[in-house]
Image (cartoon, helix red, strand yellow):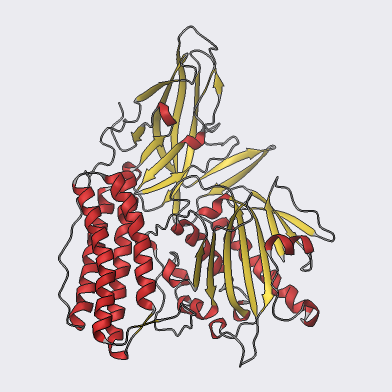
């Protein structure tokens, strides 16, 4: 068993543990500890495997070599986390034996003799995007890619990636990828993207994760590869007439939800449309599971597969509506319309195969092309009062610049940090000023915290990745600071954004709660 904690986190007391520290490319320091596999406290905390061969029956050196390979694979994966895993505070890697007897082994393990369970403990995600299924699947896929391309890939029969809050016992999400299903991605790991819900071997959601998945980032598997999955007991629908009724009932669920979304977009009730879209995502998953579990005659199978393609397009459409409604993003609504039409086309094709009448078309009303028509231009100030309503505070977004890296000074030494491959750094310069005191209470104010600023670009929300120390090229970064009357605090925030993105289309939003949520259009002409 291998565990790790973020620097500064409390490590459980262990006997005979060895540790070392390392820094990732974002400057975070991690403490890595190798714990004896028979450590009872960690076994109790994370749950030990109760089947298979005992530790005394295994070759100790082989087990150690396998654990080392898994440790190395995770070490390489963690710095590339881009979703929920960025909030990781600690992790645990637990390996266990699998049955390999020809008569007893699970075929989905594809002959692998070891199982791997990676538990990621993390803090509460900071936004709906970070708490989405997509955000978790993105980092779980990064782990799967590293594990199934490691030196020990031939020994792995199954991998589970478990996400838990740091302060809770129950896990929130468990994503499992068996070796047989992993083989469908063997030639596609280098393509990037994430494994979507229907392509994991098993998905177990216990609490509150938003079911959104970004359609254009899905890592498509090679579906010609043979896989073996365990599923729910199949529902008997051997006759074509019965099969038609099942598809018709399921389609009513999809089309009625899409019609309700369309009515709300037409009335420009985009918040309500987003909530309904989230429900449609869940409905699509339920319809897919139900349709997959119908036991049908072989001649009906092509119609089922065509129908499932349509269900998947409905899910993609709903995901775009949910995401677009958060920012009233017209491009997302256009994508949703395209996915909806594709879904209808697939379902109609399936209907034609079994002699059913085609669907009527539906459409969504897109929002205005400018998601924030009242956004402030760079140089334009937003003024609000503090909690005591005794002082006025002004916030101005000054300008932005694009850089490929930066240099920090730490204890007299300089260290260079470059943007990850495919990314670039967006520097945003801003300042907050104490512009007036109303005669009551203290004259000191605290500027908004850095985490209150989020970047919105291409329908996605980005949190800053600013270091907390002096940057050679720019000076001191922006942070919450106490200042007096007529004083000003100036600094910068750094956002890692895709290299191909256009910062002229970006917006910076400041969340002040009840005091306002001003938005600056970084592409607007400075005033």
Q: Residue at x 43, y 34 (%)?
A: 511
Q: Quadrant of the C terminus?
A: top left
Q: Residue furthest bottom?
A: 103
Give how far across and how far down residue 509 sits, in percent. 39, 36
x and y, in percent, of residue 54 in the image: 76, 79
Where residue 45 sits, quadrant-wise, is: bottom right
Please count the marks in the image: 0
Q: Is residue 196 visible?
A: no
In the picture, measured across the screen, residue 169 lies left or right of residue 356, that is right
Looking at the image, is 18 positioned above or below residue 472?
Answer: below
Quadrant in which the N terminus is drawn: bottom right
Relative height, residue 57 to residue 333 (above, below): below
* Position of residue 359 measured from the top left corner of the image (x, y, whole percent): 17, 69
Q: Is residue 312 left or right of residue 100?
A: left
Q: Residue furthest right?
A: 15
Displayed quadrant of residue 280:
bottom left
Q: Is residue 484 visible?
A: yes
Q: Position of residue 83 (x, y in %)?
A: 49, 54
Compared to residue 342, the image places residue 60 above or below, namely below
Looking at the rendering, which quadrant does residue 225 occupy?
bottom left
Between 499 and 337, the one lying in front of the other is 337
Q: Residue at x 21, y 65 (%)?
A: 341
**In this view of the protein, which residue sits in the foreground, 140 or 54?**
54
């Amino acid at each position: 068993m291998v565990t790790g904690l973020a620097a500064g986190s409390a490590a459980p007391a262990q006997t005979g543990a060895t540790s070392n520290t390392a820094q990732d490319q974002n400057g975070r320091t991690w403490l890595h500890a190798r714990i004896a596999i028979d450590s009872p406290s960690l076994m109790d905390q994370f749950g030990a495997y109760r089947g298979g061969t005992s530790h005394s029956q295994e070759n100790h050196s082989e087990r150690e070599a396998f654990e080392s390979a898994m440790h190395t694979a995770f070490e390489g994966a963690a710095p590339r986390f881009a979703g929920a895993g960025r909030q990781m505070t600690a992790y645990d890697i637990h390996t266990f034996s699998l049955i390999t007897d020809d008569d007893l082994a699970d075929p989905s393990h594809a002959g692998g003799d070891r199982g791997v369970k990676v538990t990621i403990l993390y803090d509460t995600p900071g936004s709906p995007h970070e708490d989405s299924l997509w955000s978790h699947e993105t980092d779980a896929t990064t782990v799967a890619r590293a594990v199934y391309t490691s030196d020990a890939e031939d020994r792995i029969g199954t991998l589970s990636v478990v996400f838990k809050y740091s302060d809770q016992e129950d896990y929130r999400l468990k994503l499992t990828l068996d070796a047989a299903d992993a083989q469908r991605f063997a030639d596609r790991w280098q393509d990037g993207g994430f494994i979507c819900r229907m392509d994991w071997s098993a998905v177990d959601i216990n609490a509150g994760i938003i079911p959104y998945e970004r359609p254009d980032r899905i890592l498509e598997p090679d579906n010609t590869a043979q896989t073996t999955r365990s599923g729910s007991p199949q529902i008997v629908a051997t006759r074509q007439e019965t099969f038609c009724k099942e598809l018709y009932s399921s389609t009513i669920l999809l089309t009625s939800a899409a019609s309700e979304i369309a009515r709300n977009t037409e009335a420009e009730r985009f918040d309500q449309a987003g909530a309904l879209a989230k429900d449609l995502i869940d409905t699509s998953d339920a319809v897919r599971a139900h349709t997959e579990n119908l036991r049908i005659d072989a001649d009906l199978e092509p119609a089922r597969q065509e129908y499932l393609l349509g269900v998947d397009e409905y899910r993609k459409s709903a995901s775009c509506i949910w995401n677009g409604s958060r920012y009233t993003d017209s491009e997302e609504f256009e994508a949703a319309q395209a996915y909806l039409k594709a879904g209808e086309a697939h379902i109609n094709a399936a209907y034609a195969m079994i002699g059913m009448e085609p669907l009527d078309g539906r459409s969504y009303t897109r929002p205005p092309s400018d998601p924030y028509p009242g956004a402030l231009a760079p140089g334009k100030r937003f003024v609000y009062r503090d909690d005591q309503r005794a002082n006025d505070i002004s916030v101005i977004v000054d300008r932005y610049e694009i850089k490929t890296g930066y240099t920090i000074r730490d204890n007299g030494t300089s260290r260079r940090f470059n943007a990850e491959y495919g990314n670039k750094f967006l520097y945003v310069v801003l300042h907050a000023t104490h512009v007036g005191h109303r005669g009551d209470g203290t004259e000191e104010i605290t500027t908004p915290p850095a985490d209150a600023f989020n970047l919105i670009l291409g329908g996605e929300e980005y949190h800053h990745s600013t270091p907390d120390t002096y940057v050679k090229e720019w000076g001191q970064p922006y942070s919450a600071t106490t200042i007096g009357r007529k004083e000003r605090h100036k600094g910068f925030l750094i956002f890692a954004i895709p290299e191909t993105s256009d910062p002229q289309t970006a917006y910076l939003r400041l969340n002040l709660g009840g005091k306002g949520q001003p938005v600056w259009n970084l592409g607007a002409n400075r005033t």
